[in-house]
Image: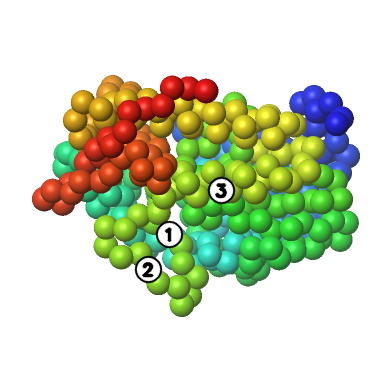
Amino acid sequence: MAEPLSTEQARAEAARAGIHALSIPTPFLVGRVNLYLIEDEPLTLVDVGPNSGKALDELEQALARLGHRVEDLRLIVLTHQHIDHIGLVDVLVRRSGAEVAALDRLAPYLGDYHGATERDDEFAVALMQRHGIPADVTQALRAVSTAFRAWGSGADVTRPLADGSTLRLRDRSLQVLHRPGHSPSDTTFWDAERELLIGGDHLIKHISSNPLVARPLPLPGEPEPAPGERPEALRTYLASLAATRELPARIVLSGHGEPVTDHVALIDERAGMTARRARKILGLLQERPLTAYEVAQRMWGNVAVTQAFLTLSEVLGHADLLRADGSVRELEQDGVVRFEALVAPASPA
């Protein structure tokens, strides 16, 4: 097996293939976001950054260094629904007239951005209340979420993409691979000829891609989830990672940070982290049944308040793994769920 490429080699190889990383600022803890300009026909931009003047200014400068303008864009491709990836789409489409390509499940969301994000907040509030987050924390987080919507925007998706379909440009064919987990709409684009994956936030080298519990995005005709039902985001994400692990990818271009050049090793490392965290949570449940919020407080202290939905998603994801193997069960009383340990945590291998 060939040695993995270095970061510099991966960037250079992507650039030779006409794919240029544009690092754009965000106001969020995650830091800068990577957009990818594909110099092909049509001229294509993958993801667009947050809706801010600073992000737009740096995007224009990055395009200019490559000899292009916003007005030259002919296709915008979106990897998923998070605001640091979709925020400038409305501005860029209005200035360039570019088509917008995104997963078919994401198209209705982008077409009704404000309505969709309101439904996201309703889903999140109900989830937080069900798993023990106090009403004052829940309402404060909803207010923050409402304010954050301005960093995002929507657009009409003119090229909806089905999972497994092919996005064809003049000099390359990109297979569309739906890889949900980090979000319901995570989409990666596989260039088999170059053994290169444009991965969005599906796999990031320096941080784990948090599998956030989010409102599902059903296709027309598919049922909406029943009240109280929630997606098992972490189990879904692990299945997506397992599928990505099988790709013979030499380069994964990520939505944040450096390219991934040994995706198998990174995915295996993340699986080990997941198993260790599940054991730790099971240990916390030995004393008595706890809500997911109580577990989060024991795991992360005050971070469980300031980033309550993120830490809640972490706990619920690992609780789903423990439920699946029979280690814990849910107990519901007065609309609040607690998790009860049924077995002791196994010793690490």
Contact check, label 1 and label 2, Cβ < 8 Å? yes
Q: Amino acid at mark 2?
A: Glu
Q: Is residue 156 left or right of residue 166?
A: left
Q: Which residue is mark 1?
A: 216
Q: Please name the residue shown 31% across and 55% down the image.
A: 123
User: Mark 2 or mark 3, which has the lower sequence index?
Assistant: 2
Say the numbered circle drawn on residue 151.
none
Residue 50 shows up from this direction: no
Q: Position of residue 241 (x, y in %)?
A: 60, 43
Query: Which residue is at the front of the view, 177 or 123?
Result: 177
Q: Position of residue 346 (x, y in %)?
A: 41, 26
Q: Which residue is mark 3?
A: 239
Of the two numbered discs 2 and 3 in the rendering, the one whose residue sits closer to the viewer: 3
Q: Secondary structure at mark 3?
A: helix
Q: Please name the residue shown 60% across and 28% down the image.
A: 269
Q: Quadrant of the N terminus?
A: top right
Q: Which residue is mark 2?
A: 224
Q: Position of residue 20 (x, y in %)?
A: 77, 40
Q: Please name the residue shown 21% across and 41% down the image.
A: 338
